[in-house]
Amino acid sequence: MSSSSLPISILAVVAFQLPFIHSVLSLNQTNSYLQHICIKSEGTYKPESSYESELKRHLDYSISNYLDYGFIYGFTLKLVVQKEVYIIQYKQTIILRKCPNNKGRIIWYDNCFLYISTIYTYQKIDYKHYLYLHNAKDVTGGNTKLFNKNTRDLLYKLKEIAIRKEQKPYTRDYMYATAEESLGTMKLYGMMQCTQDLSVKNCSVCLDTIIAKLPKCCNGKQGGRVLNPSCTFRYELYPFVKT
Ligand SMILES: *[C@@H]1O[C@H](CO)[C@@H](O)[C@H](O)[C@H]1NC(C)=O
Ligand SMILES: *[C@@H]1O[C@H](CO)[C@@H](O)[C@H](O)[C@H]1NC(C)=O
């Protein structure tokens, strides 16, 4: 194939890094669609163009060959997926229905996300794209301030676990943490994770950034999540991941 017949050479470069075994071992196996962002600044492609067929081919190839690793990074693709939920395999059509024709897009599911971009983001912290979700229920008992503080304490505890010195790359729990904290008769459960392309130091920076979003996302809520293409956290008053 000559380069002129390949209008999107960037897609032809398959540079997968496979440093990753898992994402969240969620108790919720439905892996529902959460939200998506169409990145308009990266432009669009024409339906049924060779760009589109390359993209489809790329997705198929990555997903069928590398899904077991849980983390895929190609030049155009960043996919973090829970190993047990082989959702993406049958979801290509759904993926491509979100932001049809956008070269850049991020699609979040409950247990994984897919990031397609023409920009090389490997090892870079994403400061642009955030998704805030919260449990609909407010904290009861009136002590919102204390609850927020407890949540923040739990998040910092999770961060210390996620960036711990002794952990090794290529392992299941690399830059991943779960923890729980007793709050009187209740328990607060938390999970935190960076994508494994980040350095541990940058993981720490990323986590600080999303922890700082806690008031924006989840003030006084019984549960909440900040999702970003580089790192994420979640807390709830009920267990939501296998530990
Ligand atoms: C799983 O997640 C979906 C969407 O977030 C939610 O509607 C459903 O109730 C959850 N199921 C369980 C068992 O938690
Ligand atoms: C850390 O993140 C910055 C900002 O995204 C990036 O430019 C830098 O290359 C990263 N450093 C490492 C060691 O990965």
Image (spheres, rainbow, N blue to C red):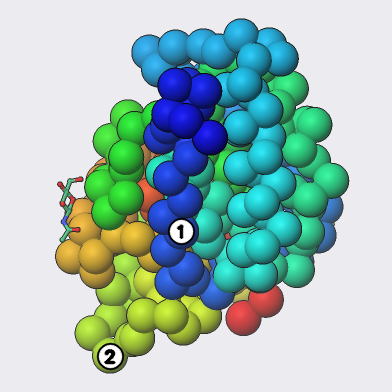
Near-viewer residue (85 or 243): 85
Mark number displayed over residue 53: none
Confirm whether residue 125 shows in the render: yes
Helix, strand or loop status at disc 1? loop
Helix, strand or loop status at disc 2? loop
**Residue depth check, mark 2 versus mark 1: number of the one nearer the observer:** 1
Q: Which residue is mark 1?
A: 16
Q: Is residue 41 toward the left or the right of residue 66 in the image?
A: left
Near-viewer residue (241 or 89): 89
Confirm whether residue 35 shows in the render: no
Q: How far across and down, in percent of the image, does residue 137 sit?
A: 66, 40
What amino acid does circle 2 point to? Answer: Glu
- The vertical placement of 216 against 203, above or below, is above
Q: Residue at x 28, y 81 (%)?
A: 164
Q: Residue at x 58, y 70 (%)?
A: 69
What amino acid does circle 1 point to? Answer: Phe
Q: Residue at x 75, y 68 (%)?
A: 84
Q: Residue furthest front?
A: 2
Does the beta carbon of the residue at mark 2 sit less than 8 Å from ligand 2? no
Q: Which residue is mark 2?
A: 166
Find out whether the residues at labels 2 and 1 contact each other: C-beta distance under 8 Å. Answer: no
Label 2: how many Cα within 10 Å (few below 14, some 14–19, many 20+): few
Q: How far across and down, in percent of the image, does residue 166 sit?
A: 28, 90
Real-space Cα separation, disc 2 to disc 1, in angstroms: 26 Å
Q: Which is more N-terminal, label 1 or label 2?
A: 1
Q: Residue at x 23, y 85 (%)?
A: 165
Q: How far across and down, in percent of the image, does residue 143 sit?
A: 46, 49
Label 1: how many Cα within 10 Å (few below 14, some 14–19, many 20+): some
**Quadrant of the drawing holding the C terminus:** bottom right
